[in-house]
Image (spheres, grey):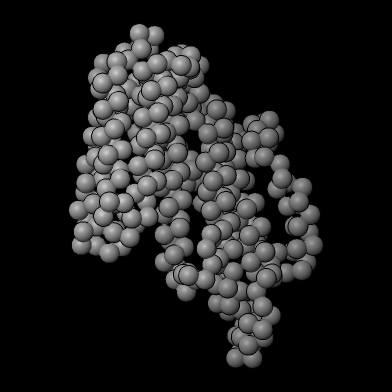
Amino acid sequence: MKKKLLPFPAVAAAAALDVLIPDSELQPAADRPYYLYFLGILAVVFALFFLVSLWNTAADEKLREKAPLYAGAVLLTAAIDLVTSKYALLPVLFFPGMDRVFGVFASDWRLLLECIAASGKLLLIGFGIGAGLGFLTGILIGFSKKASYWISPLMKVVGPIPPTSWSPLVLSLLATTYQAAVFMVALAVWFPITLMTSSGIQNVSNSYFEVASTLGAGRFTRIFKVGVPAAMPSIFLGVFYAACSSFVTLVTAELLGADAGLGWYLNWQKSMMLYANVYAGLILIAGICTVVITLIFRLKDRILVWQKGVIKW
């Protein structure tokens, strides 16, 4: 029980430090104590999580496992608050106080929502195109020696090149900067999914296909009923790598001339030297990326339920 309660004293300690220690005169003051509001929200979330864990076994196990991590994360924010807001140990222009950073979510929430929608649209289009082409290319390489002969060398040349390095070429070939951004995101997704899909299929035991052929399975059945399901662990690993790569590419791709999006927001705020807004945007990107990756793992656990307890990644 004591382990489950660790986040509460951490939140209390962080709030006490913020209230008892005055802000540095070098640090511009925020209009409201947004960091305290943030700690209050965390306290409510932890309390709800704790109440649910009292009668839910899964929540209880997760809270016992994650409570020290949650407490450590809260104390880390308290340490950052001391370094920036309270003592201004770092240049205040580049390292604003926690109140100013969290205040951005209150002042710019409409613009941030518009940027999330714009980036989400770009990410969905690019990821969908890249994942679809990567899956098909991976199947071709995995099942066809002729396709592997011609496509594998291309992958070895194109794959290691960062997708954003193609910006001069795609900007001159494609009609709009938006199309160029979609291309770079799709390229960032295509390579890892192609690589892991083909690798997973090639590592499937031949005995599976021999048994399927003996039972009268055709080529289509051997591919989509035997090869692809057996390669799903590798395919999901490729999707995980693709998701991480797509977020990195997305931010850079939006610098090419987009008029909305999280990458555009970061670049705009940096050019105006509003670093509190920059850090708020980075926090938002990290949070969204964490949610997306968590959803991918949840989907993997649901589809590959047979893998539970056998392979961990």
**On screen, 163 above or below 276?**
below
Residue at horizontal 37%, vertical 55%?
A: 65
Residue toward you, 54 or 113: 54
Decide which of 263, 69 is in the foreground and name it. Answer: 69
Q: Is residue 310 visible?
A: yes
- The answer to whether residue 190 is above or below residue 210 is above
In this rendering, the answer to whether 135 lies above or below 276 is below
> Is 66 left, or right, of 182 in this rendering?
left
Tell me residue 211's x, y (percent): 63, 88
At x 39%, y 9%, the residue is 26
User: Percent position (x, y) of residue 178?
Assistant: 53, 34
Q: Residue most toward the top?
A: 25
Kindly tell me whether residue 136 is visible in this rendering: no
Q: Residue at coordinates 52% horizontally, 48% vertically from top-left?
A: 243
Residue 25 in percent (x, y) is at 35, 8
Q: Residue 107 location in percent, x, y?
A: 30, 23
Left or right relative to 167: residue 117: left
Q: Nearer the viewer, residue 122 or 68?
A: 68
Q: Foreground: 245 or 225?
A: 245
Q: How many marks?
A: 0
Task: Name which residue lies at 69% across and 80% down.
Answer: 206
Q: Quadrant of residue 44?
A: top left
Residue 32: image quadrant is top left
Q: Which picture quadrant has residue 281?
A: top left
User: Which of the image's four quarters has the N terminus?
Assistant: bottom left
